[in-house]
Amino acid sequence: MDIKKLPKTEFAAAVAQIAGERNIDPQEILDAIELGLISAYKRDQKEHGNLISDEATFEVEITPSSGSFSIFQTDGDSRVDVTPPGFGRIAAMTAKQVIDQKIREAERGTVIAEYQRKLGSLVAGVVLHIDPYKINVGIGKTEGILPKDEQIRNENLNLGDKKLFLLKTISEDETGRKEIILSRKDPNFIKELFSREVPEVGNRTVVVEKVARSSGERTKVAVSSSQPGVDPVGSCIGQKGSRIQAVLGELPSIEKVDVIAYSKSLQQFIANALSPAENVKVISIKDGLAVVEVPEDQLALAIGAGGENVRLAGILCDLEIKVQGTK
């Protein structure tokens, strides 16, 4: 059906009105109705035992006087009306279903476009459904998906839980349906928490340079400031730890967060990154490997449980770090 050739009927006026109100192309609605009607016709014929060849082609035509639909089978120059008796009721139901679906798709498309502009930011959500592979989260007028690999390890979310989530990306499946993908595991989730809780990070007085994270266990955040008199680490910790506690309050209780000072001096940055270990001495940096020494009583702190502290420090510094006790 061509919208330009559509007779001026109540149906045509209704399509035009819906298209205008919902910001949908009228031709898109008509094309969808045409496909829906042809599909409904084939289904009707199958139910009555009439087989239709896969090569058969059909057209839909609207009757000017009544606004009803007719189905024509075409073969070259041949065009035969094959509209079955009583098809008007099926056509009306199909047209309504198609229009309703197009309205839902258009509204969802508007919502998706809104969240597309907010990618990388935090959004509040409530847990709606949990299965072994994903969690459905209500966010505003729509839902987002928290896949298994974007969940914090060992964090148990329950139905009705209200949490913050990172708007990570918009994915599209094989049918073209778009999904909002959320994350609580991504390192940028931590960065956005600091931006939310620390005004100096929000206004860029303090910059989060790098984040290294083992979600649910430990995170290291390197911060800097070019503004004289601003202590970037102190700003992130807050008076009596108020700001860092606000960040930790959004994480599992077992996850620790180290805030360290970023330094352009790689040796100093390595020493800072191995916090809470003290008296770190960098012996050599060569071919992506840094060898450091720490006092024996600091060795366990520098390495961390399961080697986590030194591993995350290495991620911050883009190096492999080998820690040894002072000889």
Image (cartoon, grey):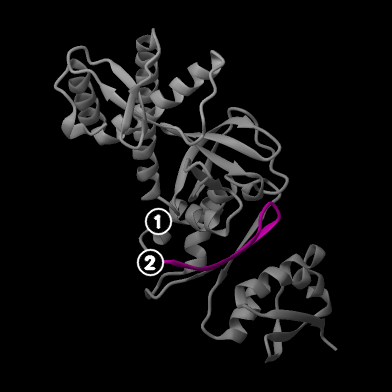
Which mark sits nearer the N-terminus, 1 or 2? 1
For the record, the magenta segment spans 205-220
* Residue under pointer 1: 199
Image position, residue 281 (x, y; %): 70, 86
Image position, residue 79 (x, y; %): 32, 28
Tell which residue pokes out farthest to the top in this image.
Answer: 86
Image position, residue 277 (x, y; %): 72, 73
For this view, does 296 lie left or right of residue 181? right
Classify mark 2: residues with Cα within 10 Å, few (<14), some (14-19) or many (20+): some
Q: Does the magenta run of residues contain 218? A: yes
Classify mark 1: residues with Cα within 10 Å, few (<14), some (14-19) or many (20+): some
Quick one: 263 or 227, which is closer to the camera?
A: 263
For this view, does 249 lie left or right of residue 105? right
CB under 8 Å between callouts 1 and 2?
no
Question: Quick check: 153 above or below 289?
Answer: above
* Residue under pointer 2: 205
